[in-house]
């Protein structure tokens, strides 16, 4: 994929999809980092590692909010929403910026038909807050 034309959230979602498909983060992240401007590289790395670290907690929350799983061809959007949830829960980034930039990343990934879903799920997540984890197994 040509990462130079994508917002870094879309790049992060694509990297995380590659991890889901069997690559390790240390295999696919260096190429993605090399394709971005130097000022975006630390942010991409932090988002990818952070989303992986909290994957089970974020994925559990996202799955609770979705009425049905996202179709396999659109799975990158699932990871895009995980990136946004990570930023909402664990970063200082302004909520409106996370929401707006995630919807724009959804468009950049050629999934404009899913922008309403992305916006609705993330707005609900921000409004309702994070669910309480049941135990420490939510982190690995």
Image (cartoon, rainbow, N blue to C red):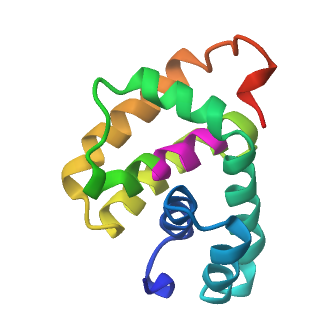
Q: In terms of secondary structure, what is the magenta stretch mainly?
A: helix
Q: Which residues are magenta?
A: 79-86
| Spot occupied by residue 107 in the image (x, y as percentages of width and height) | 30, 62
The quadrant in which the C terminus is found is top right
Residue 116 percent across, percent down from the top left: 26, 41
Q: Is residue 39 above or below residue 60?
A: below
In this rendering, would 140 be left or right of 122? right
**101 left or right of 107?**
right
- Residue at coordinates 18% horizontally, 51% vertically from top-left? 113
Q: Residue at 65% x, 45% y: name it.
A: 87
Q: Quadrant of the N terminus?
A: bottom left
Residue at horizontal 28 percent and vertical 28 percent from the top: 68
Residue 121 vs 101, above or below: the answer is above
Task: Choose top left, top right, bottom left or bottom right for residue 94.
Answer: top right
Residue 6 belongs to the span the image colors magenta? no
Give 85 or 63, whichever is nearer the viewer: 63
Specify whether 37 is left or right of 6.
right
Indicate the position of residue 125 as horizontal and vertical percent values.
50, 26
> Which of the 4 quarters of the picture holds residue 58?
top right
* Residue 82 forms part of the magenta stretch: yes
Q: Position of residue 108 (x, y in %)?
A: 35, 69
Relative to 30, does residue 126 appear above or below in the rendering? above
């Amino acid at each position: 994929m040509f990462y130079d034309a994508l917002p870094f959230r879309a790049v992060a979602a694509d990297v995380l999809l590659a991890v889901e498909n069997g690559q390790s983060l240390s295999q696919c992240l260096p190429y993605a980092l090399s394709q971005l401007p130097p000022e975006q590289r630390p942010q991409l790395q932090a988002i990818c590692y952070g989303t992986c670290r909290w994957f089970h907690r974020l994925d559990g929350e996202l799955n609770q909010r979705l009425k049905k799983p996202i179709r396999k061809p659109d799975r990158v959007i699932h990871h895009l929403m995980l990136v946004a949830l990570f930023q909402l829960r664990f970063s200082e980034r302004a909520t409106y910026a996370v929401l707006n930039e995630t919807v724009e990343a959804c468009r950049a990934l050629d999934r404009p038909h899913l922008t309403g879903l992305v916006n609705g799920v993330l707005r609900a997540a921000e409004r309702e807050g994070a669910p309480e984890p049941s135990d420490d197994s939510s982190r690995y």
